[in-house]
Image (cartoon, helix red, strand yellow):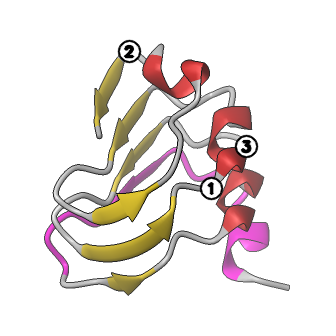
Amino acid sequence: MGVFEQLTKIETISLRSNNMDGSIQSNIANLSMLRTLSIGENELTGNIPVEISNMFALESLKLDQTRLSGTISESICALKSRSL
């Protein structure tokens, strides 16, 4: 069982400017209660997982100043607060 499967009730993840690298795993979408995901200003690479667009509780997404790429879905663009 991965870490995201164990954190089902978490509402906020803020890891800005933490020198993180690697990619965002698609199983982040298992965080069904997540309202805020702030992981900008890191060395993240790869595609933005399409599964993020299925995170219906998500209100704020901050992915700015990363090396992420890919298509941004309309549902992500409609979030109340976003920095892509």
Q: Quadrant of the C terminus?
A: top left
**Which residue was labeled with disc 1?**
49
Segment colored magenta: 3-18
- Mark 2 and 1 residues: CB-CB less than 8 Å, in contact? no
Q: Amino acid at mark 2?
A: Lys
Residue at the image position 14 percent from the left and 70 percent from the top: 17
Q: Is residue 69 left or right of residue 8?
A: left
Please name whichever residue, 66 or 55, is drawn nearer the observer in this view of the structure: 66
Q: What residue is shown with label 2?
A: 80
Q: On screen, 71 above or below 38?
A: above
- Quadrant where the image shows the N terminus: bottom right
How far apart are labels 2 and 1 at the CA level? 19 Å
**Whole-percent x and y of residue 68?**
38, 62
| Amino acid residing under circle 3 | Ser
Q: Earlier in the sequence, mark 2 or mark 1?
A: 1
Q: Earlier in the sequence, mark 3 or mark 1?
A: 3
